[in-house]
């Protein structure tokens, strides 16, 4: 049964990635194009070559970009999101297989939606509070490694804090005290995340004259893209998982 759930989770992730790609093409990519235009318009002009080297400079071919912008918005975006969707969909199915039946009497579709919503909050929303998404024109090249490590560190912190909170909630839960245990778990999670966000480095490399509306629209589109992905995974996988579990019970 786990194998059946695994490939259905990967398929749900790919479906979610395709829908997220359509959303990104309509809402996120136009903001990226505007950000690239801003970067190009604010880049310093190259110094003119000295007279004795003018002929050689004129004869040098312009450096070509490795991947064209059209490829990035088309096949590149579809491929990247499809691989990402298949990976997270597979992991999602394994977590579903482990957790199903352990959180009350939720059905497969309800549990899949709840799990997708929790994943969206823990992996997308909470890290974005500390490190919100920024378009390509924002950020220094020499800090790419730091920004990447800090962002994934924030994701690990969010998931780890959720695991600790869930563990404590499970220990403290008693008949008639489930609500209090849940509140305690939420408080512990918020406290751990808040402490981690305080200790992690603050990174703010947005230029002072960068258009605020453009930055806002890009961040909303980025969150929306992830929302489409996880909503699709929760709905599609829940439907397919219900069929798998129903067939398993009938055997």
Image (tube, rainbow, N blue to C red):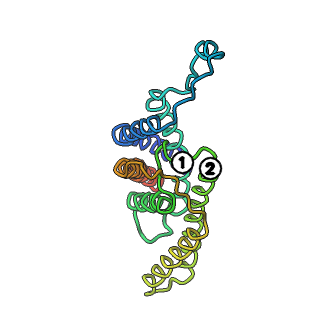
Of 52 and 46, which appears nearest the observer?
Answer: 52
As displayed, is residue 221 above or below residue 50?
below
Name the secondary structure under disc 1: loop
Q: Position of residue 31 (x, y in %)?
A: 38, 41
Read off the residue under disc 1. 139
Near mark 1 (Cα within 10 A), the count class, few <14, some 14-19 or many ≥20, is some
Of 97 and 10, which appears nearest the observer?
Answer: 10
Residue at the image point whose x is 56% and y is 54% from the top:
94
Q: Are marks 2 and 1 in contact (CB under 8 Å)?
A: yes
As displayed, is residue 68 above or below residue 44?
above
Count of numbered badges drawn on the protein: 2
Residue at the image point whose x is 36% and y is 38% from the top:
30
Name the secondary structure under disc 2: helix
Of 133 and 243, which appears nearest the observer?
Answer: 133
Residue 236 visible in rendering = no
Q: Position of residue 23 (x, y in %)?
A: 36, 41
Q: Which mark is residue 26?
A: none
Near mark 2 (Cα within 10 A), the count class, few <14, some 14-19 or many ≥20, is few
Q: Position of residue 97 (x, y in %)?
A: 53, 57
List the single residue furthest toward the front: 51
Residue at the image point whose x is 47% and y is 62% from the top:
129
Q: CA distance from mark 2 to mark 1?
A: 7 Å
Of 66 and 213, which appears nearest the observer?
Answer: 213
Quarter of image, res 176: bottom left
Q: Position of residue 157 (x, y in %)?
A: 59, 65
Q: Which mark is residue 143?
A: 2
Residue 79 visible in rendering = yes
Quarter of image, res 196: bottom right
In the drawing, does residue 124 fall left or right of residue 216? right
């Amino acid at each position: 049964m786990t194998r059946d759930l695994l490939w259905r989770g990967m398929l749900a992730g790919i479906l979610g990635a395709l829908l997220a790609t359509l959303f990104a093409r309509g809402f996120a990519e136009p903001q990226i194009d505007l950000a690239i235009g801003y970067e190009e318009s604010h880049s310093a002009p190259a110094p003119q070559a000295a007279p004795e080297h003018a002929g050689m400079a004129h004869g040098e071919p312009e450096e070509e970009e490795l991947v064209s912008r059209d490829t990035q918005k088309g096949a590149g975006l579809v491929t990247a999101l499809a691989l990402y969707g298949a990976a997270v969909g597979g992991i999602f199915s394994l977590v579903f297989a482990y957790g199903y039946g352990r959180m009350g009497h939720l059905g497969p579709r309800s549990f899949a939606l709840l799990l997708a919503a929790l994943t969206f909050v823990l992996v997308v929303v909470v890290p974005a509070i500390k490190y919100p998404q920024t378009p390509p024109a924002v950020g220094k090249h020499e800090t790419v490694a730091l920004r990447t490590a800090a962002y994934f560190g924030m994701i690990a912190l969010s998931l780890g804090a959720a695991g600790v909170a869930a563990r404590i909630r499970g220990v403290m839960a008693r008949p008639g005290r489930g609500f209090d245990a849940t509140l305690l778990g939420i408080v512990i999670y918020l406290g751990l995340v808040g402490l981690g966000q305080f200790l992690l480095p603050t990174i703010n490399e947005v230029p002072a004259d960068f258009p605020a509306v453009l930055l806002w629209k890009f961040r909303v589109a980025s969150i929306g893209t992830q929302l489409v992905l996880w909503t699709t995974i929760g709905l599609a996988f829940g439907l397919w998982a219900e069929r798998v579990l129903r067939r398993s019970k009938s055997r």
